Image (spheres, rainbow, N blue to C red):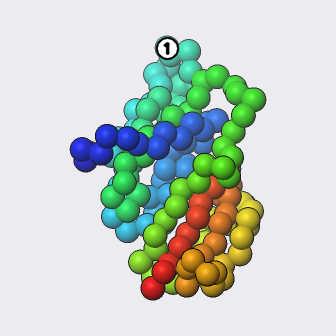
């Protein structure tokens, strides 16, 4: 893992491993570094993600499945901003991320980006995708 000192930490409600596998399939230079699961004797759900680390485009993220039910989830006020290497990369990510999710701003040209969109994926995580050319 890199020497990155701050990592975004994503807390899921039982779907962390599914999300990690999905996210790392979307972008080049993305890997699953480790996934530790809860044991059968643990108070968490057996097999749930106790702690995971993965990279997206070389940036380290962490994730868990929370054993505690919370009254909050992800919000668009905190989003993952991706500088895409091509319009094709942006469009492919957009189509995958919106499957079961929602569009906040559709793909298009904006004053700040040649192609940009903002979406919430099926897990509730918010993404801003940008290609400046």
Q: Residue 133: x, y in percent?
A: 45, 85
Q: Residue 10: x, y in percent?
A: 53, 41
As displayed, is residue 23 above or below residue 109?
A: above
Q: In which quadrant of the rendered image does the N terminus lie?
A: top left
The quarter of the picture where residue 27 lies is bottom left
Query: Which residue bears the numbered disc 1?
Result: 41
As displayed, is residue 40 above or below residue 49?
A: above
As displayed, is residue 38 above or below residue 32?
A: above
Q: Which of 42/77 is in front?
A: 77
Residue displayed at 65% across by 66% down: 118
Q: Is residue 90 visible?
A: no
Q: Is residue 122 left or right of residue 26?
A: right
Residue displayed at 68% across by 46% down: 75
- Give the farthest residue toward the front: 111
Q: Is residue 86 visible?
A: yes
Q: Secondary structure at mark 1?
A: loop
Residue displayed at 73% across by 67% down: 103
Q: Is residue 13 left or right of residue 16?
A: right
Q: Which of 31/6 is in front?
A: 6
The quarter of the picture where residue 71 lies is top right
Q: Residue 82: x, y in percent?
A: 49, 65
Q: Is residue 28 left or right of residue 12?
A: left
Q: Dot 1, how many residues are within 10 Å of its Cα: few (below 14), some (14-19), or many (20+)?
A: few
Q: How many marks?
A: 1
Residue displayed at 37% across by 41% down: 6
Q: Is residue 30 left or right of residue 103?
A: left
Q: Residue 97: x, y in percent?
A: 62, 64
């Amino acid at each position: 893992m890199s020497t990155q000192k701050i990592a975004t930490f994503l807390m899921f409600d039982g779907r962390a491993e599914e999300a990690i596998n999905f996210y790392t399939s979307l972008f080049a230079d993305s890997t699953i570094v480790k996934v530790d699961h809860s044991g059968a004797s643990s108070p968490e759900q057996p097999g749930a993600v106790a702690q995971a680390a993965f990279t997206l485009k070389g940036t380290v993220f962490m994730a868990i499945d929370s054993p505690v039910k919370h009254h909050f989830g992800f919000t668009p006020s905190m989003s993952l901003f991706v500088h895409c290497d091509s319009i094709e990369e942006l469009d492919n990510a957009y189509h995958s991320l919106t499957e079961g999710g929602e569009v906040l701003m559709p793909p298009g040209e904006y004053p700040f980006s040649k192609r940009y969109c903002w979406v919430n994926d099926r897990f509730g995580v918010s993404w801003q995708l940008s290609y400046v050319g």
